[in-house]
Amino acid sequence: MSNTDFVLAIEDLTVSFDGFKAVDSLNLYVDKNELRVVIGPNGAGKTTVLDMICGKTRATSGSIKFKNKELTKLSEHEIVRAGIGRKFQTPSIYENLTVFQNLEVSFPKGRSVFGCLAFRLTEDVVERVHRIAEGIMLEDHLEMEAALLSHGQKQWLEIGMLLMQEPELLMLDEPVAGMSVKEREQTAELLSRICNNRSVIVIEHDMEFVKKIAHKVTVLHQGKILAEGSMEKVQADERVIEVYLGH
Ligand code: ADP
Ligand code: MG
């Protein structure tokens, strides 16, 4: 395909595990500043799609273009450097460091200059830590040890750590699992704020949450797109109700 304005353009993407196609000829296009939610039954291939975008799982065939750059041949590191951040289901924060330190160590380091030095604490870094801490509602907890945060706050911290890299595409796999109702609401607001200058892909099962955040919803089923469009549209789709929402 020729150059596009899409941040992400996935075409004819397939991965097969011993002949089983977990993702099957998928086409998916995400706009600049779009917040896309991917839903679908367990085993639909949702996590596998994110794994392929971030280079953890290699495509059997097809193309993934990020800002018109082909990703399928790049390493995971190169994909991060290209501007893609990905949050896994379980948070990977440093429990024994403070919130401030967790954010600070996530600042992207230059390739070699500062590589093994204790990290250089410039005004830029401090400024970014404070700005992001505010965005993730942890500005009053900067000196707190991460281990003492609530489950929800740990999830926000990990989002903050990804934001330190200023990714243009952020991907989150089931970010509100295990959160309280209040934390879910706050997370919805957080995500709406951060997609102001980046695209976000969220996988989620909580339909109340999806309704709050989604610009557009993609329903995945057996590695293929079953339906796509506004929340209203996919919710009213008979096939979506049959394979997913009805359960
Ligand atoms: P979802 O996130 O939608 O629940 P997944 O993407 O995790 O689904 O999995 C889709 C299917 O692919 C499942 O049947 C899963 O067992 C299979 N699968 C995922 N990763 C692998 C792998 N590395 N090897 C073999 N099968 C896999
Ligand atoms: Mg999954």
Image: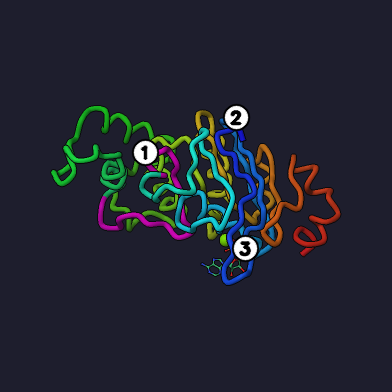
Q: Earlier in the sequence, mark 1 or mark 3?
A: 3
* N-terminal label among 3 and 2: 2
In the picture shown, does residue 182 fall above or below 163? below
Q: Amino acid at mark 2?
A: Thr
Above or below 62: residue 113:
above
Looking at mark 3, is its residue's CB closer than 8 Å to ligand 1?
A: yes
Q: Residue at x 64, y 49 (%)?
A: 12
Q: Is residue 123 left or right of residue 201?
A: left
Magenta residues (range): 79-97
Q: Which residue is mark 1?
A: 165
Q: Residue furthest right?
A: 238
Q: Is residue 29 left or right of residue 176?
A: right
Is the residue under label 1 in contact with that under label 2 (CB below 8 Å)?
Answer: no
Residue furthest to the bottom: 18
The reply to whether the magenta stretch includes residue 40 is no
Q: Residue at x 66, y 46 (%)?
A: 27
**Residue appearing at x 76%, y 58% in the figure:** 245
Q: Position of residue 202 (x, y in %)?
A: 57, 47
> Is residue 84 visible in the rendered structure shown here?
yes
Q: Position of residue 222 (x, y in %)?
A: 70, 62
As shown in the figure, which amino acid type bears the numbered disc 1?
Answer: Gln
Label 2: how many Cα within 10 Å (few below 14, some 14–19, many 20+)? some
Residue located beneath label 3 in the image: 22
Nearer to us in this view, 235 or 15: 15
Q: Which residue is mark 2?
A: 4
| Disc 3, SS | strand
